[in-house]
Amino acid sequence: MSATFCRNIVSRRAVNVPTTVKSVANGTPIVPGLNLRAAAPADPHSHDEHAPAGPRADIGFVPSWTSKAVTRRHSLFSHSAINAKVSTHQVRAFSSSTRALDAPDFSANRVKNPDVHRAFSYFLIGSFGAVSAASARSTVTNFLSTMSASSDVLALAKVEVDMANIPEGKNAIIKWRGKPVFVRHRTQSEIDEANDVDLSSLRDPEADSDRAKRPEWLVMLGVCTHLGCVPIGEAGEYGGWFCPCHGSHYDISGRIRKGPAPLNLEVPAYDFNDAENKLIIG
């Protein structure tokens, strides 16, 4: 068995790599199935057309791209043969030179006094926070003011009544928030009559002292509790108020005594201003 045949059995095949094949950065050619142990046959285009296959004349040294490779009897042997992929990255190593690098000098841009610079930064942050808080407060205040009552509604929120203009035993009708308000300056006999009523006989039991802060002054909404009509003063079977719409009778304290109305006349919030002798409703 010839030596060439044995070499082909070991290497399986022999490949002549053309000079135009691609290679990686360290010089290793990119050829699938490359076996570095193979010995290339003789060039068939040589001057000796009948020359037998043999080792190439240019394999007399170990290429730089081989790993752990040696030459034996004109054959290249390698313990490892790697076909690496083409890499587009360039490998850069750290410089081992002892020459000092020319780095730029930024010492002129450094802060001379860090405490002053820190105080100025805190001042800017505090000022920005104060301005932001004031802007937020103004925005919220303006938004909430749009939901508040208008000036004409606020004007009707409270009504002042001069008590000197209402003589004893007479009624006054005041308009408050679009509703009539009955103000009665009662006599002593009317007060006694209101207190002599048996509460157990009332449909909506309520003492006269609970309805009037001062016995001589009775303040009520002039709206019937049945269907919202306006009762007539000094009328009815009990000398108080009478609703002609459905026949509801109220006594001198505004309590329902007869008719379809279920409740007494409502008493609004009111107070007295003794310094000016006025009644404040609302």
Image (tube, rainbow, N blue to C red):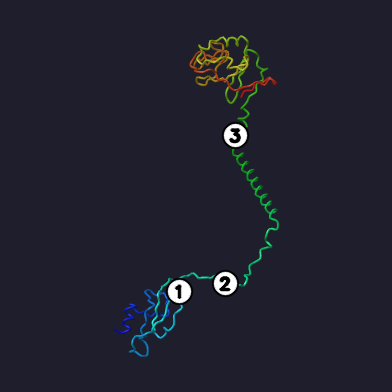
- Residue to which mark 1 is pinned: 24
N-term mark: 3 or 2: 2
Q: Within 10 Å of the Cα at label 1, are there few (<14), some (14-19), or many (20+) other Cα atoms? A: some
Q: Position of residue 130 (x, y in %)?
A: 65, 45
Question: Which label number is shown at residue 148?
Answer: 3
Q: Position of residue 55 (x, y in %)?
A: 37, 84
Taking 13 as reference, is 102 above or below it? above
Q: Position of residue 70 (x, y in %)?
A: 42, 79
Q: Report the residue at 59% width, 20% height from top.
A: 181
Q: Within 10 Å of the Cα at label 3, are there few (<14), some (14-19), or many (20+) other Cα atoms? A: few
Question: Which label number is shown at residue 96?
Answer: 2
Label 2–label 1 contact, CB within 8 A:
no
Taking 18 as reference, is 195 above or below it? above
Task: Give the structural element (helix, strand or loop) at label 3.
Answer: loop
**Amino acid beneath label 3:** Ser
N-term mark: 1 or 3: 1
Quadrant for the N terminus in the image: bottom left
Q: CA distance from mark 1 to mark 3?
A: 81 Å
**Looking at the image, is mark 2 or mark 1 nearer the viewer?**
2
Pick the residue in front: 86 or 245: 86
